[in-house]
Image (tube, rainbow, N blue to C red):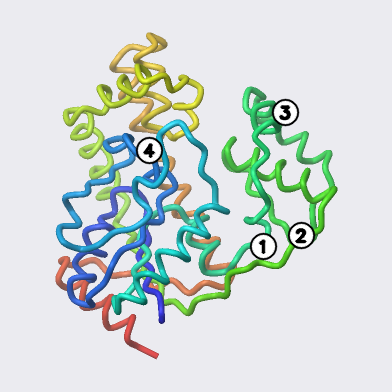
């Protein structure tokens, strides 16, 4: 069965659009969000589960907060969800903003199946980014591997892959490619920026800081929470007294804006890598739903 993909930067409205389309196509949604897989991390990851209504969703709340989750696990979980949806006679819709996960599903990164090395990650995590970059440069880069060094997390993963490939032969990717149609939401920058700021204020009123405090109280180390993304990084630093509230809000708000820009950069990279993304025009949700369905049904 053909897969429909709905992608976009944070606060672009992709989940609401995917749900509206799912109602028309008898669809079920598979999340492509690297953080929404964690239980008890709801507000900071923007799960907004009420948005789904009676539309089935998958790959949300699949592992406990504090655990590690990586693209290898995601590919296996995605295939199980995709197969289950198809067996139920529903239309699978992949929706999210983690471009790396989406690209792995669509193009089958062979290197994504390299296993996690917990000991190596523990040794690398405290190191500054510049030191990590030098470590990667000192390693032989496997053929066809394009290392993403844009964040500490991805840089560590690149070192992990390069280190593993020094001693192992890369097995074939076990997952066949799935035909797909991709649509993307790219709101005007001023609209996106206002949505991000408004949503951050809403999440803080909704209990973001209280959520992070509960995670800390439940024994999740601060350095692990920092690893889970911007909201958890800055909220943890604020709760530990490392900055006052105004600095916390300003720095987090700025960081989320930059993150949205990096997401768009990655989506453009996906296009350069051969994935055709149909960027939606501005309009009402009803207009966008019709445009998505027309594109999905086209040859």
Against 188, residue 27 (above or below) is below
Compute the Cα span from label 1 to label 4.
30 Å
Q: Which residue is mark 3?
A: 131
For label 2, count other residues whose C-alpha is less than 10 Å away and answer few (under 14), some (14-19) or many (20+): few
Against 281, residue 59 (above or below) is above
Quarter assignment of residue 6: bottom left
The answer to whether residue 60 is left or right of residue 121 is left
Give the SS element for disc 3.
helix
The answer to which of marks 4 and 2 sits earlier in the sequence is 2
The answer to which of marks 3 and 4 sits earlier in the sequence is 3
Q: Which residue is mark 4?
A: 256
Residue at image location 63% in from the left, 68% down from the top: 174
Compute the Cα span from label 2 to label 3.
27 Å
Compute the Cα span from label 2 to label 1.
8 Å
Residue farthest top in this picture: 241
Residue at image location 77% in from the left, 46% down from the top: 164
Quarter assignment of residue 56: bottom left
Q: Position of residue 59 (x, y in %)?
A: 38, 54
| Res. 110 mark | 1
Q: Nearer the viewer, mark 4 or mark 2?
A: 2
Q: Position of residue 38 (x, y in %)?
A: 39, 40
Do the numbered discs 1 and 4 sit on residues whose CB atoms are within 8 Å? no
Q: Position of residue 78 (x, y in %)?
A: 45, 61
Give the SS element for disc 2.
loop
The quarter in which the N terminus is drawn is bottom left
For label 3, count other residues whose C-alpha is less than 10 Å away and answer few (under 14), some (14-19) or many (20+): few
| Res. 170 mark | 2
Compute the Cα span from label 3 to label 4.
25 Å
Give the SS element for disc 4.
helix
């Amino acid at each position: 069965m053909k897969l429909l993909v709905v992608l976009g930067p944070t606060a672009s409205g992709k989940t609401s659009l995917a749900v509206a389309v799912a109602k028309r196509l008898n669809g079920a949604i598979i999340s492509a969000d690297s953080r929404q897989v964690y239980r008890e991390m709801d507000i900071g990851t923007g799960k907004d589960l009420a948005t789904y209504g009676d539309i089935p969703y998958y790959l949300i709340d699949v592992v406990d907060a504090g655990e590690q989750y990586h693209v290898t696990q995601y590919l296996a979980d995605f295939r199980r969800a995709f197969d289950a949806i198809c067996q139920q006679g529903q239309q699978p819709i992949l929706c999210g903003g983690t471009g790396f996960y989406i690209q792995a599903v669509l193009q089958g990164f062979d290197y994504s199946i390299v296993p996690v090395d917990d000991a190596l990650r523990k040794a690398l995590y405290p190191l500054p980014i510049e030191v990590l970059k030098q470590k990667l440069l000192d390693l032989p880069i496997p053929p066809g591997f394009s290392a993403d060094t844009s964040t500490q997390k991805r840089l560590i993963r690149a070192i992990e892959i390069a280190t593993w490939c020094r001693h192992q032969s890369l097995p074939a990717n076990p997952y066949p490619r799935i035909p797909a149609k991709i649509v993307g939401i790219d709101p005007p920058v001023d609209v996106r920026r206002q949505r991000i700021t408004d949503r951050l204020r809403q999440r803080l009123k909704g209990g973001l800081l209280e959520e992070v405090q509960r995670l800390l109280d439940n024994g999740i180390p601060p350095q692990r929470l920092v690893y889970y993304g911007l909201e958890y990084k800055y909220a943890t630093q604020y709760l530990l007294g490392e900055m006052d509230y105004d600095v916390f809000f300003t720095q987090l708000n700025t960081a989320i804006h930059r993150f949205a820009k990096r997401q768009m950069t990655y989506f453009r990279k996906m296009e350069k890598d051969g994935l055709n993304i149909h960027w939606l025009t501005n309009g009402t949700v009803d207009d966008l739903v019709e445009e998505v369905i027309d594109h999905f049904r086209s040859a």
